[in-house]
Amino acid sequence: MKLETVVFITDIVNISYYVLPKNYIFEGESHDFWEFVYVDKGELIITADRRRYLLKTGEMAFHCPGEYHDLQTIRNSTANIIVVSFCCDSPCMDYFRNKILLLNPFEKECLLRVVTESESAYEFFEKSAPGINMQKNPNAPFGSDQLLKTSLEQLFILIYRRQDGIGIRERRIGSNALQNHAIIVQRVQSYIRSHYAEKLTLEALAAQVNISVSQLKRTYKDQTGSSVIAYLTKVRISEAKRLIRESNHNFTQIAELTGYDNIYYFSRRFKEETKMTPTEYALSLRR
């Protein structure tokens, strides 16, 4: 009985694991083979032709032959990604165009086998972008190329069977979105610096920039890599340290002046931020 082959990979151009630094920008390229990007950690902004969209941890996106594409990390955030480039003319590959695919645990295991086998079979396996340097290891395990090929083909079949990819339009970012997001963050931080002594809530901060709480949390995280509450705490504790240095107020007064109505909660947050209690910090200033 002749076996049916629905996915047939003829060549593998690149398999690399990249650790992208903060504010990394890849200027872009196009080529005559397929490529996919998988985000192992962090988030990416990807451009495919003229479409710009967000790719999150655990998600994969394909670039078809001839498609211009570039990528960049979210502002002030790093990202770990897997990039695999390959040649495949199978008709079912059309399914992977213009989709974002969230891998399930079994599919992640398949991808991990591809990366692990590539590290064993090829020298100079990339750890930082940019660069492709697929040089076969003379001591590569027996059958490594075939395992790479069949593991990738298995991964594509499993994903195809689910038929539940996300259309990239759902993640599309408008031309002014990144600039608008940066403005939102600046406005929120400015408001916090001016009103840290008040009982600020995420609802109140979101209202200041006319967005929902969930949008505020997501936008702030995307732009800074941290949370709104972490920034509020940083501002409050920085002011508390200044007041302690001036020695004009007791700790209860300082807690109230920096937005805390509970001295015990203030002390706990102070220690979390500085690794010292307010008393220990005050004593350290006298040494």
Image (tube, rainbow, N blue to C red):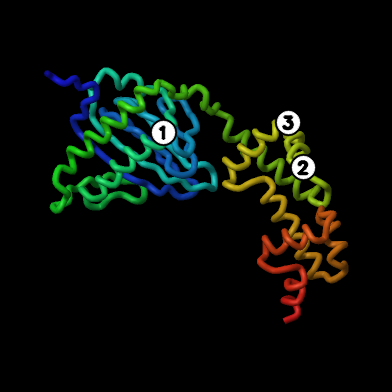
Crowding at dot 2, Cα within 10 Å, few <14 / some 14-19 / many 20+, comes out as few
Q: Which residue appears at 44% of the width and 34% of the height?
A: 59
Which of discs 3 and 2 lies nearer the camera? The answer is 2
Q: In this view, does 62 lie to the left or right of 85?
A: right
* Image coords of residue 199 (percent x, y): 82, 47
Q: Examine the image and state in which quarter residue 253 appears.
A: bottom right
**Which residue is farthest front?**
1
- How far apart in space, not on screen, are marks 3 and 2 (Cα)? 14 Å
Q: What element carries label 3?
A: loop
Q: What residue type is labelled 2?
A: Thr
Placement of 189 over or under 70, stated as above or below: below
User: Disc number at residue 201?
Assistant: 2
Crowding at dot 3, Cα within 10 Å, few <14 / some 14-19 / many 20+, comes out as few
Mark 1 vs mark 3: which is more N-terminal? 1
Q: Which residue appears at 24% of the width and 24% of the height?
A: 7
Q: Which of the image's four quarters has the C terminus?
A: bottom right
- How far apart in space, not on screen, are marks 1 and 2 (Cα)? 35 Å
- Residue located beneath label 3 in the image: 210
Which of discs 1 and 3 lies nearer the camera? The answer is 1
